[in-house]
Image (cartoon, rainbow, N blue to C red):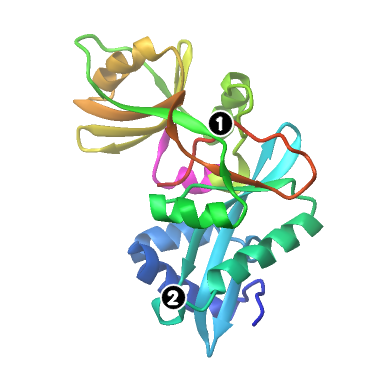
Amino acid sequence: MFAKHPENQDIPALRQLWQEAFGDDDAFLDRFFATGYSENRCRVVMRSGNAAAALYWFDCQWNGKKLAYLYAVATAKAFQGQGLCRFLMEDTHQQLAKQGYAGTILVPGSDGLRRMYDKLGYTTSTTLREFTQEAGDEAFPVTEISRAEYARLRAVLLPEGGIAQEGAGLAFLETYASFYAGKACLLCAVKDGQKLFVPEFLGDEAHIPGILRYLNCKEGTIRTPGEEKPFAMYRRLTDDTSAPRYFAHAFD
């Protein structure tokens, strides 16, 4: 058994595994492989021309250290129960440590997965607050901004212990989300009709009802820094015992 970085001819097999595991359509995968994918940020176990297990990562930064946000970890149904996920994760940890990464971070999709990652050395280190908010009566104006401007402003507003996410991660996020800035606030938002999903809001939360009204949305699901909801899990790859405390963009 061995893992490798994929080659161009492996991409159809990677797409097939992704769709089996997560159910995303071709349009979503087209966006991911055009903006978020790099063969150097993917590891795969191939079996008879099929992607038996695979994972991807995005580079991010925390306290001047390089981290890998592991994303879309999956094992094909035909190969489950053979220890492929554990093997792939351990292989990836070793490869990342050799490349100077200080740690890995991921966001489990269920409590069962959270328990599985706990057995692989991960601990829940970041939290956030998630709530539903109705639109207010008066609009609070915000301006749509570029991802470069979002990254710049986010670096200023990021809470202590927060992970900076830029580069390919924001490029992929931009394929389905928009970035806005207003007086004393910054947000990333995904609009679906008159509903808004805000995977990150930084700044004065008193403006949220007015922003929803300004964006012509009746209600929104909002995530902000907070301690209510366990979110990302962290595994260190060095002797440093500290851990990040805030992580936002899980691309969910």
Q: Is residue 173 left or right of residue 240?
A: left
Placement of 229 over or under 102, stated as above or below: above
Query: Which amino acid does the dot numbered 2 rest on?
Result: Ala
Q: Quadrant of residue 94?
A: bottom right
Marks counted in the figure total 2
User: Upstream in the sequence, badge 1 or badge 2?
Assistant: 2
Q: Quadrant of residue 134?
A: top left
How far is disc 1 from disc 2 in space, using C-alphas? 31 Å
Q: Is residue 228 magenta?
A: no
Q: Is residue 43 visible?
A: no
Q: Nearer the viewer, residue 13 or 106?
A: 106
**Residue at 48 percent of width and 11 percent of height:** 184
> Crowding near pointer 2: few (<14 within 10 Å), some, many (20+)?
some
Image location (x, y in percent) of residue 157:
57, 19
**Residue at 46 percent of width and 76 percent of height:** 81
Q: Is residue 173 magenta?
A: yes
Q: Which residue is mark 1?
A: 246
Placement of 183 over or under 68, stated as above or below: above
Query: Which amino acid does the dot numbered 1 rest on?
Result: Tyr
Q: Which residues are magenta?
A: 170-179
Instruction: Please identify the residue farthest to the bottom as the structure is shown.
Output: 48
**Residue at 62 percent of width and 20 percent of height:** 156
SS at circle 2:
loop
**Residue at 63 percent of width and 34 percent of height:** 244
Quarter of the picture containing the N terminus is bottom right
Image location (x, y in percent) of residue 93:
69, 59
Image location (x, y in percent) of residue 224:
43, 25
The label shown at residue 14 is none
Q: Which residue is mark 2?
A: 76
